[in-house]
Amino acid sequence: MIPAAFEYHRPADIRGALSILVEHGDDARVLAGGHSLIPMMKLRMADVPHLIDLQDISSLKGITIEGGRITIGAMTTQHELITNDALHAAAPLLREAALQIADPQVRYMGTIGGNVANGDPGNDMPGLMQCLDATFTLEGPNGTRTVQARDFYEAAYTTDRDDAEILTHISLDATTAGYAYEKQKRKIGDYATAACAVLITKENGVVTSASVAMTNLSDVPVFSEAAAEALIGGTCDTAAVKAAVAAALADIDPTEDNRGPVKFKMHVAGVIIARAIERAWSRA
Amino acid sequence: MNDMTPERDARVANLKGMGCSRKRVEDARFTQGKGNYVDDISLPGMLTGDFVRSPYAHARIKSINTEAAMALEGVVAVLTAQDLAPLSLHWMPTLAGDKQMVLADGKVLFQGQEVAFVVAKDRYIAADAIELVEVEYEELPVIVDPIKSLQSDVVLREDLDPKAPGAHGPRKHHNHIFTWEVGDEAGTNAVIDDADVVAEASMYYHRTHPCPLEPCGCVASMDKVNGKLTLWGTFQAPHVVRTVASLLSGIEEHNIRVVSPDIGGGFGNKVGVYPGYVCSIVASIVTGVPVKWVEDRMDNLMTTAFARDYWMTGKISATKEGKITGLHCHVTADHGAFDACADPTKFPAGFMNICTGSYDIPIAYLGVDGVYTNKAPGGVSYRCSFRVTEAVYFIERMIEVLAIEMDMDPAELRRINFIKKEQFPYQSALGWEYDSGDYHTAWDKALKAVDYDGLRKEQAERVEAFKRGETRTLMGIGLSFFTEIVGAGPVKNCDILGMGMFDSCEIRIHPTGSAIARLGTISQGQGHATTFAQILASEIGIPADSITIEEGDTDTAPYGLGTYGSRSTPVAGAATAMAGRKIRAKAQMIAAYLLEVHDDDVEFDVDRFVVKGAPERFKTMGEIAYAAYNQAIPGIEPGLEAVSYYDPPNMTYPFGAYVCVMDIDVDTGVTDIRRFYALDDCGTRINPMVIEGQIHGGLTEALAVALGQEIAYDEMGNVKTGTLMDFFLPTAWEVPNYETDHTVTPSPHHPIGAKGVGESPHVGGVPCFSNAVQDAFRPFGNRHTNMPHDHWRIWQTANALGLHH
């Protein structure tokens, strides 16, 4: 559990970080909270000759809410997400989900940016961001661009981010929709056996909009448009929930691991999705 | 004399003796990060050792090339079996009478096995050098199933003559280690064949691991000038390590000093001798400087001693009224690549023959076959006396299965079969003499405390609601009644590598009335410095706060066999009381001299000797101590010291009654422990708060084992649970609220009547949690499902019973 030797960099601004990234190419990685990357380095599964610690870059920190738009700096910790009351008022799903990530010690260090950018299918924030239809801002040597969370993930640990880019901000619309993040895990600190984020807007007693996304049930987070469609226009009655669950299950592809075989995961996923929908509906 | 005066009460309270919840004296340093663990030791010039480990479970080693590693700056040595062979240290004897490779000799037999030992200036360089050692392997067929192992042509241990007997008698197959039989098999079979009712079950008690917070490690320092070897390490039995080190190295025992500093949990994992100790000693001898070796978490989980891994089949017979008539048990025991179980020599399956449990079973038989596989060696007693957890799990499952067979309430079935109070001392069918017990009283108290009848009524209502589709949650009521067998043990039948399992205490009273006591045991979190001082306070009348307890340094502590198997209080605690009584006997003579009366005319009273009938005439222990050193007393040597080596006449038999109430989500397999009630009877209670802490800890480890903690292998022999992501170590989050309770049935043969408690909650807890899960599914036809009851296995049980639509 000793990492190979590496150079440690601690730039004060994005420009400095980018120049190190450009200089070392594949040999450099940025470090946010370190709760995914450092264990991989200790296991010598990740070889990082140049580690660029982002903690001194103040522009990557903080939460702002303006005109119904939320912007979160990539280096904002899970703990800061949980304790920000304005954020809770604007998008309560975030606190509910962040409280289910690991344990308080990890949440003091772990950041939202690291969680979404690493591309680990076990991380909770990617599915959540897809559910919230968040936008990621990426800054690279050729300037800044944005990409939707729903378009960002390509495969396990592979995303749309270029090696020379840094994910700097996450933005999303404030929402008053009914919400739920339902997660089954074996113990505190574990990745999900199955997890599901749901948002539902209700008008005149029926679902007018819905969003359903899932965590750790494929090699990427899964946003299920079909599941949302199955709910829209209905009253989240048993038949509608059943149809949405069936649609969501058709979109996932879990693999067997120590949490259990595929058959079990599919069954639990169905239960978790249904519970998330029912709880979101009850809050809509 | 009036025993109840406030003045006397104040003197008793001042002692903080037995029965008081004295705060742990160790905690000041532990809670402030001021403990001194082996990895805190740093000596001038110290090097660090680390292992190249096998990625394969079974492979021949074609070659080892250390050139590139040796070329790395800061690398001092790379040891292989070839380097150890001239010293005959490439293999070492195990505690179980087998031998074990220190470094791979021609082949590897389990994943993670030690192949080469890199010695470098620091642990970072050592870690880099490990990657540079080139080992060429040729993979061999892997066996991870002991039953298949006994049918396989693949020879795991090529070093053993397949025809020659092993340490425990004849071997039946080249992968077979021993057969151990206790009891009357023919008689038992005859009873079972003729019985009104017979219930059968096969159960796998999965492999798990003690996983102490601090892994294993040592610092070896050979001083070539004075010829002395000092070895600091995480040793649960430092004196045994000294003797073994002397026998292996040829260094005379007086030239070896073994020190166990603070130890962060042992639970059996730190009893054995590991290749890291041998390699560190050799490396220190070779380099002439101290060498440290400390495992990381993966090393600890994958290679140092595991626990359990018993495949058990049982038959239990009864009359139609439910009176048990016979018990048959067979175990196929997976010992891994080497037989390194830590058991008393004559007990290759530990005290598995306590498997008749708390019940009056007239005839029984136990047969155990030990088997080699391509898994890590070990087989230690994880928070239990030797294999008692397996035995109690077996009988408590057999009782439940019999209750199902007879359509009886399992609480009532237990009650009608308990050994009765008047039957003690009780001779069990498999050879033990239970010292004391009052099982019916404990059972009734437990069932009343939880309103057992009310729970059963609620459970029946829940089942009906479930059948009507109104709930998807079932309720399980887990029962267990256990009898432990601890305090190994009488030297006449308990030894380890020939060393009798007595223990010891040496006391020195200082002239000003404080004291130091040294013991042959070693605390790993049990709180010995707190509780042994309490025993002494009550025995010799010196306040516990004025008594230092010291353990773990073989240069100063009297010889003892260490701390495991809940033996410290039954054996060293007894030695402490006996040594204290020697002090008191001498103090009585001194007091009589000072008071100018005959020895028989003074009596001990809390903290002093008083003249009988004249309590105003007394000498305090402080005054007596001062006189012992500073006053010439005719016929009495100066000083006030005593030592006692205690060979217990029998084991002690703590017992307890546990009840767990659990809700189970049938659709997800998620469990929620609503209630856990634990009644323990450990005889005389020395410190109720320490007992409660022990019970909370043991129950938590029981919860872990029952609900998810395992060392799992795939078919290739890869460890699937080598990190704490997959190896379940419960936190405060997973732990329920425990309700503790007690009865007190003192041991009749122990000087203070204490029986030991550290392991009872684990022994009783595992079947209690498991029975709760199994009980929830009993109304739907469940008889037995194997642990660990993690979400997917519970789901699988529900699925197999047709409870999912």
Image (cartoon, coloured by chain):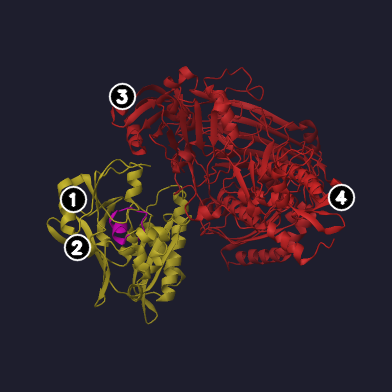
Chain colours: A yellow, B red
Q: In the image, which is nearer the foreground, mark 4 or mark 2?
A: 4
Residue lying at the far bottom of the rendered structure: A204
Chain designation of label 3: B
Q: Numbered disc 4: what chain? A: B
Q: Residue at x 67, y 40 (%)?
A: B506
Q: Is residue A117 magenta?
A: yes
Disc number lying in front (2 or 1) = 1
Query: Total of numbered circles in the picture?
Result: 4
Identify the element where label 4 is drawn.
helix
Determine which residue is flagged by label 3: B67
Position of A61 with respect to B698 (left or right) is left
Amino acid bearing label 4: Asp
- In the rendered structure, the answer to whether residue A197 lies left or right of residue B677 reads left
Asked if labels 2 and 3 touch by Cβ distance under 8 angstroms, the answer is: no
Q: Which mark is residue A83?
A: none
Residue B341: % across, % down:
59, 33
Q: Is residue B132 visible?
A: yes
Q: Mark 1 points at which residue?
A: A21
Residue placed most toward the observer, B679 or B478: B679
Element marked by disc 1 = helix
The residue that mark 2 highlights is: A146
**Residue range corresponding to the magenta coloring:** A111-124
